[in-house]
Amino acid sequence: MKHTPLILSIIAFVAAATALILTLTAPKNHHKTVEAGESIQAAAGDIVYIRLDTLMMQYDMYSDLQSAFEAKAQTIESDLNKKGRKLESDIKNFENQINKGLLTRSAAEQQNNSLQQRQANLQNEAAQKQQELAEESQVLLNQVMYAIKTYLEEYNKEHNFAAILTTTESTNVVMVGAPALDITQEIVEGLNSEYIKTRNTTKKDE
C-alpha cells in the first residue's frame, strides 16, 4: 500500500496557517523610538506617523488574541499528529500482516480500502483545519485593526492632525520621519488603557 508521510504533511498544513498570525510580530524596526514619557512635539495640522509593527507587538489586545490563537493551533496540530501516528502504525501493521500471509485476499482488500479512506479523511481534516485557522487569523487581525482605527478616530478629534500615517518594516509609507512626529508610544499607551477597561468589564460580566 502506497501512502504519503502524513505527519509531515499535517504539520506543514497547520504550521502554514499559524505562521499567518506571526508575521506582523517580527521585531524589526529602523525608526527612532520615542521613549515613554517623552513629549510629543507634533501640533495640530501636522502629519504624524505610527510604527504599526511596534504597536502590534506592544498592544495587549493583540497579545491576548494571539496567545489564544496559538494555543488553539497547537491543540489542533497535536490532535492531527496523534491521528496521523495511529494511522501510520495501522498501515505498518497491515503491511506486516500482508508480508506474512496472515490475511485472505478479501480481508486484505477490505482493510486496504479502510486505511485509504482514513488517510483521505485525515488529509481532508488537516486541509479544513488549515482553512479555519487562516480565516480565524484574518478575523483576529481585522478585530485588532478595527480597534486601532476606532481609537485613532477619537484620538484625532482632540489633536486635529492633518493625517496619521502608518509604517512597517515591509511597507514603508514613511521612509524618513522626524522622531517628534512619531506618536507610536502615545497610541500604545492609550490603546492598552482602553483595552484594560474593556477586558476588566468583560471579566466582571462572565
Image (cartoon, helix red, strand yellow):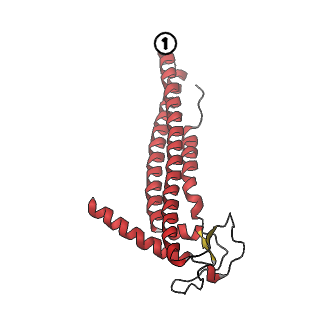
Quadrant location of the C terminus in the rendered image: bottom left
- Relative horizontal placement of residue 25, taking residue 30 as reference (left or right): left
Q: Position of residue 104 (x, y in %)?
A: 48, 13
Q: Position of residue 173 (x, y in %)?
A: 69, 67
Residue appearing at x 48%, y 68% in the figure: 151
Say which of 128 and 146 sits in front: 146
Q: Position of residue 70 (x, y in %)?
A: 47, 55
41 versus 128 height, above or below: below
Residue appearing at x 58%, y 82% in the figure: 34
Residue 94 in sight from this viewpoint: no
Q: Position of residue 169 (x, y in %)?
A: 66, 67
71 versus 131 height, above or below: below
* Amino acid type at image mark 1: Ser
Say which of 64 and 190 sits in front: 190
Dot 1 corresponds to which residue?
106
Residue 165 in sight from this viewpoint: yes
